[in-house]
Image: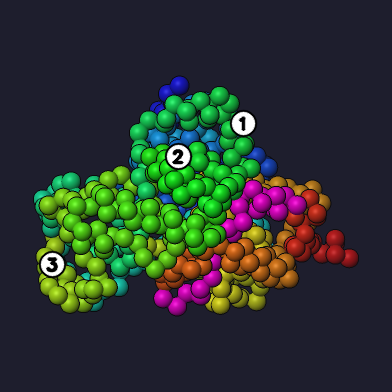
Amino acid sequence: MTAARQLQRSAPASAVPPHADVVVIGAGFGGLYAHYRFRQLGMSVFGFEQGTDVGGTWYWNRYPGARCDVESVDYTYSFSRELLDEWQWSERFSTQGEILEYASYVADRFDLRRDIKFESKIVSAIYDVAANLWTVRTEKGESITCRYLVTTVGCLSVPKDPDFEGLESFKGQWVQTGAWPKEGVDWAGKNVLVIGTGSSAIQSIPEVAKTAGHLTIFQRTANYSVPAYNGPLPEHRQKEVFADYPAYLAMLRKTRGGQTFELQTDNFAADFSLEEQRERMEQAWQLGRWNLQSCFRDITLNEDANRLAGEFVHAKIRETVKDPATAEKLIPRGYPFGTKRLCLDTDYFETFNRDNVDLVDINEEPILRITETGLQTSAKHYPADLIIFAIGFDAMTGPLVNLGIKGRGGHSLKDAWADGAESYLGLAVPGFPNLFTVNGPSSPSVLTNMILSLEQHVDWIADCIAALRERGLDIIEARQDATDEWAQHTEMVANHTLFPKANSWYMGANVEGKPRMFLAYIGGFDNYAARCDAVAANDYEGFALSTSKVEERA
């Protein structure tokens, strides 16, 4: 059934009230669902969003070729059966535009904009111990107090600013993939430079190359990428999903990553013969998605198994890219397969066979400066009309520390995380009462289907607040000992894998001066959710619960 996508546009908030039970920062998928759930509890809720509308990461990342790398039938809200019946995705991996349309449809369907103030950048959120209230202030001077502060700011929402000598002198146009202009960008017939070869570059480069006069790509680190094979949802997947869609989505909550793959197995690579290994990897390549990462159980645990997959992708690159020198530059080296976020692409490697596309390895030919008319490397000058910076994000922690959050004693979250971001379950931080972080550091977050993950977080937070209210309690704070234990467990689980061997944004390695630690929980969404449920069932073990009411203290 095709969605009836024309709903009356819900009006955003016109003014900031003096107080709300809950303040939600961010109006992406996490923020929208938070508004829905807290309303269900009968609580007053108000939200802020820096953009002009809902959508979060899908509002800002409008770059050409932007798509979700989780199948759309999985990357969808599960809380409303009616919504599941009304909306039908048009492609296997939907475009940014369609995902943004979905966010807008949900906002209209449940009238969620009415309590959200858009174009509002948060500059501070300060906790008053005596009053047990947070005061949240915007860049425009507006303020609101709340009992509970919930951040839904996303994990990849603070793009790294380009820091290149001479950029201010450039006479052409420059843009960032993570903050793409809403009015769009025209690159047809122009000399275009792309700096970076991460996920957003891998998605945008094939699109830009189609009409650019000439495209030059500057690469520091070659990335692993596998074909998405986008198009209609395959018939076998339609049968699996739509036989009972709610049951299917419930089943995803029992998986490690909130998705299933055709070639998932409990078998190790060594359990297969050499011929079976090759056949299995070829089958995974033809199926697309992240099947290659799941076709052996130990592919991110065992160096020998990992090397099989890495060498398989190397061979595919050499088969695809006609120029041997370019192919060698594109082959990922120096880190295990899949330990930087594995990219899904449409004709990425094929794009380097175009006559109007060149690749520069900046390890061999460093960038010296941006000039008035282009870019100067150690070897030559590259003229440019347009420079596209695809240089990544200050992931996981950046969006949170930028909010100016201060807890007990005026201690800032930025200072608390100066030596590393420690958080209890990715939900709460010692010293910051009644602050909840949706998909915070040390939760599964970016290693999962994010909508499934954020629904679990918001549900847990809402249930927690409801339980506190039933007991006449209004303060909850993560204990330091529980946070330390979770941090040790998170590190131990990560160290059982090959992930820490890569200088990735998972490790904070892409931001100068950022502490090196694995920022997500890699033990599986299923195990994580079970731990959260056990904590709640055991009287919120690891949290200190209390009341601010004087009469109840006596």
Q: Nearer the viewer, residue 18 or 187?
A: 187
Q: Earlier in the sequence, mark 1 or mark 2?
A: 2
Span colored in magenta? 512-534
Is 456 on the left or on the right of 284, as rendered? right
Crowd class of label 2 (few under 14; some 14 to 19; many from 20; radius 10 Å) = many
Helix, strand, or loop for circle 3?
A: strand
Q: Is residue 355 visible?
A: yes
Check disc 3 and report the residue beneath it: 382
Q: Are marks 1 and 3 in contact (CB under 8 Å)?
A: no
- Residue 71's disc is 2
Q: Earlier in the sequence, mark 1 or mark 3?
A: 1
Pointer 1 local density, CA inside 10 Å: few below 14, some 14–19, many at least 20: few
Q: Residue at x 62, y 63 (%)?
A: 493
At x 23%, y 73%, the residue is 364
Q: Residue at x 41, y 76 (%)?
A: 512
| Residue found at x 59% / y 59% | 521
Q: How many numbered discs?
A: 3
Q: Is residue 439 magenta?
A: no
- Disc assigned to residue 247: 1
Distance, label 1 to label 2, CA atoms, is: 17 Å
Question: Dot 1: what SS?
Answer: helix
Distance Cα–Cα, label 2 vs label 3: 38 Å
Q: Position of residue 137 (x, y in %)?
A: 51, 63
